[in-house]
Amino acid sequence: MSHLGFGINDHVAEIVLDNPPQNRIDEQMAEELLAAVEKAESSGARAILLRAEGPDFCFGGDIVTWPDLDVRQLRMLFERYMFAFNRFEQMPVPVIAVVNGLCFGGGFELALRSDVIFAGEGARFGHPEQTLGIVTLLGGIYRSAARAGRARAYEWALTSEQVPAATMAQAGVVNHVLPDAEVLEAARAFARKVAAGPTRAHAAHKALLRMWEAGGVKAADDSMFDIAIPLFESKDVTVALASAVAAYKAGQPRPTVDFTGE
């Protein structure tokens, strides 16, 4: 049976965790995530929505088989997970995650690879790895630190506490907190809005942020014009810039542009 669902509507691809009862991540789900990424890229989707079936987003990795694996096998397993998660993170379109219930371990690490996180008021986040004597194997601690700072990220890893959505929003990890029953539709509306925007510009901003995370302002500055200037040859910029100039010369408000993503 599939552990992950996929569909497209209004240029938004939905990737759905569906491995009840806890939506735990296993090898099958990781492989299906890779397949979903490839489908989304080939489909021309202009935004991705990540969500989960059931009351909880994800309890983390499926640890049942881990004691039976030697360290070489464990490394190979986690490298496959890391590859799938990073491919998801590197998609050149906006990625929006919708989190309800518990979002722990590998589930939290997957949500952290999204660009924008919508959370229900009852959602809780955390790193349970210290209860097993291990680290956040898929980069959770430093991705938390990138959003919330070193001190908070390390404390969460030290304690494995279940952190409420409101606290995560205050720390800068979560973008929006809404009533549990409303969060999915709000996230879908946001995804449709960004999918109708300048897709190539969204990808460029995402690339610049990756450069900044890797090397700071200097690295991003050094890459700026290699990333930004090709946009001026895109159909979206050609149309939008010409209409903005025409409106300015006519003393009229700038018109709304129907971006095509090209």
Image: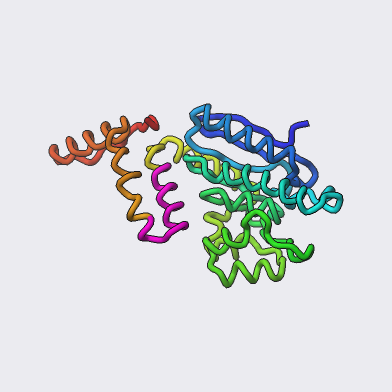
Residue furthest out toward the right: 68
Q: Does the magenta stretch include residue 210?
A: yes
Q: Quadrant of residue 245?
A: top left
Percent position (x, y) of residue 107? 68, 51
| Location of residue 151 with respect to 144 vertically, above or below | below
Q: Is residue 177 magenta?
A: no
Which residue is at 56% across, 51% downward?
A: 117
**Closest to the observer, 40 or 198:** 40
Q: In this view, does 128 lie to the left or right of 98?
A: right
Magenta residues span: 203-219
Colour scheme employed for the rendering of this structure: rainbow
Residue 9: percent from left, percent from top: 55, 29
Identify the residue shown where x is 62% and y is 56%.
139
Q: As displayed, is residue 201 above or below residue 113?
A: above
| Residue in front for this viewpoint, 244 or 173 | 173
Magenta segment's dominant SS is helix
Q: Which of 238 and 211 is in front in this view?
A: 211
What is the count of numbered marks? 0
Residue 118, image x and y in percent? 57, 50
Q: Residue at x 17, y 41 (%)?
A: 248
> Which residue corresponds to the image point at 37% horizontal and 41% vertical from the top-left?
201
Figure check: 193 above or below 123: above
Lateral position of residue 68 relative to residue 234, left or right: right
Nearest the eye: 150 or 53: 150
Quadrant in which the C terminus is drawn: top left
